[in-house]
């Protein structure tokens, strides 16, 4: 029996004061957005499920001001024990060590046989992934 989607208030962290509505349910997708005060950089996070595989699509810059939204979304996904976690980075133009830490945490939560995949990083993001060694614990496609 599939669970019905529901809505709830979603606050990524204190650094991003915007209230976000998170819609979640079996087979449903989730979308949340955050824009730090005083910047024009927004982060969008969208979660989608298919056959036990969770895909988290991220758009924007991931840094200390926006990573809370990504961490919170990953926490919700990881509680559902995906067989595979794909983090689509195609629309991410920049990430810093806070994003690397979020990816590392996700890798450590999932059992080893359940991969964390960093999909389609742009060249600059791929270089950061390689320089930090995160490509040694996550699959990069």
Image (cartoon, helix red, strand yellow):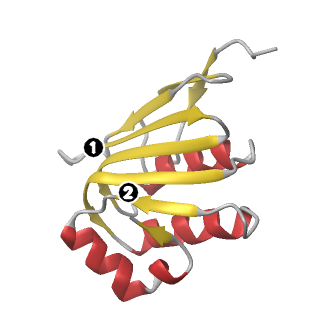
Which percent across, then down, holds residue 117?
50, 61
Q: Is residue 19 above or below residue 34?
A: above
Label 1: how many residues lie within 10 Å, few (<14), some (14-19) or many (20+)? some
Element class at badge 2:
loop
Q: Is residue 64 left or right of residue 120?
A: right
Which percent across, then down, holds residue 100?
46, 72
Q: Residue at x 45, y 30 (%)?
A: 31
Q: Is residue 88 above or below residue 31?
A: below
Q: Earlier in the sequence, mark 1 or mark 2?
A: 1
Q: Which residue is mark 1?
A: 42
Disc 1 or disc 2, which is closer to the eye?
1
Q: Quadrant of residue 73?
A: top right
Q: CA distance from mark 1 to mark 2?
A: 10 Å
Q: Is residue 62 left or right of residue 99?
A: left
Q: Quadrant where the N terminus lies?
A: top right
Q: Which residue is mark 2?
A: 65
Which percent across, then down, holds residue 7?
60, 17
Q: Quadrant where the C terminus lies?
A: bottom left
């Amino acid at each position: 029996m599939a669970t019905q989607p529901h809505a709830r208030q979603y606050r990524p962290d204190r650094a991003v004061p915007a209230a976000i509505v998170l819609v979640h349910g079996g087979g449903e997708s989730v979308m949340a957005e955050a824009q730090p005060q005083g910047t024009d950089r927004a982060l969008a996070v969208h979660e989608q499920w298919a056959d036990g595989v969770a895909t988290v699509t991220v758009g924007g810059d991931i840094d200390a001001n926006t990573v809370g939204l990504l961490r919170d979304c990953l926490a919700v996904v990881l509680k559902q024990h995906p067989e595979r976690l794909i983090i689509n980075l195609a629309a991410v133009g920049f990430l810093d060590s806070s994003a690397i830490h979020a990816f590392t945490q996700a890798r450590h939560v999932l059992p080893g046989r359940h991969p964390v995949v960093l999909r389609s990083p742009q060249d600059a993001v791929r270089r950061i992934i390689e320089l930090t060694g995160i490509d040694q614990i996550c699959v990069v496609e």
